[in-house]
Image (spheres, grey):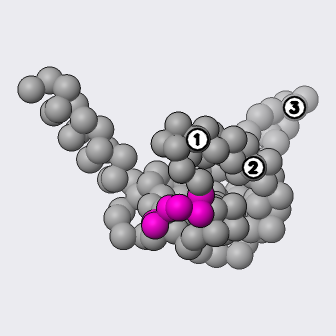
Amino acid sequence: MKTEAVRCKTALSSEESVSVALPLIAEMDGKPLALEEEVTRELFEELIGELLERTHDPIDVVLDDAGISGQELDMVLLVGGSTRIPLARQDIQEYLGLEPVQAVDPDYAVAEGAAIQGGILFL
């Protein structure tokens, strides 16, 4: 199920709907139960909307710790695979008033940053 959920989430970043089919997810009264569903981007966005809103408080904390406001930012660079979700980019743009830059591969940027930090800490 998890593999299919990840596939669906990833596909919805570029498609408006995705067919999800799991031929056997359980058994009830000796009969197999399957799942066949069409998942739309609209439904997915409804499901994740609250999670995106929950990122606003940590953003505010980081800005406050840095002693700046969102209006003082020159650029917003999103990293991590979930930043491919169109609603995630839209939410950040609306919240901070800046269009996020997509200058790096969001999957590798986190790993590269961790490797650099690891090198700094252990040298």
Front position in the image: 95 or 79: 95
Q: Indicate left or right for 46 with 109 as reference.
A: right
Q: Residues within 10 Å of mark 3 (few under 14, many from 20)?
A: few
Give how far apart the Cα atoms at labels 1 and 2 are. 18 Å
Q: Are marks 1 and 2 in contact (CB under 8 Å)?
A: no
Q: Closer to the observer: label 3 or label 2?
A: 2
Residue 64, label in figure: 1
Q: Is residue 123 above or below residue 42?
A: above
Crowdedness of circle 1 by 10 Å Cα count: few (<14), some, many (20+)? few
Q: Identify the residue at image location x=9%, y=26%.
A: 123
* Residue of label 3: 28
Q: Which residue is mark 2?
A: 53
Frontmost of labels 1 and 2 is: 1
Q: Is residue 37 visible?
A: no
Image coordinates for residue 49, horizontal then vertical, percent: 78, 54
Residue 50 position within the rendered picture, expressed as x and y whole percent measured from the top left: 79, 48
The N terminus lies in quadrant: top right
The residue located at (36%, 70%) in the rendering is: 103
Residue range in magenta is 70-75
Label 3 vs 2, first from the N-terminus: 3
Q: Against 89, is 57 above or below?
A: above
Q: Give the residue at x 49% y 42%.
A: 66
Residue type marked 2:
Glu
Report the side of 48 relative to 29 (left or right).
left
Q: Position of residue 5 (x, y in %)?
A: 64, 50
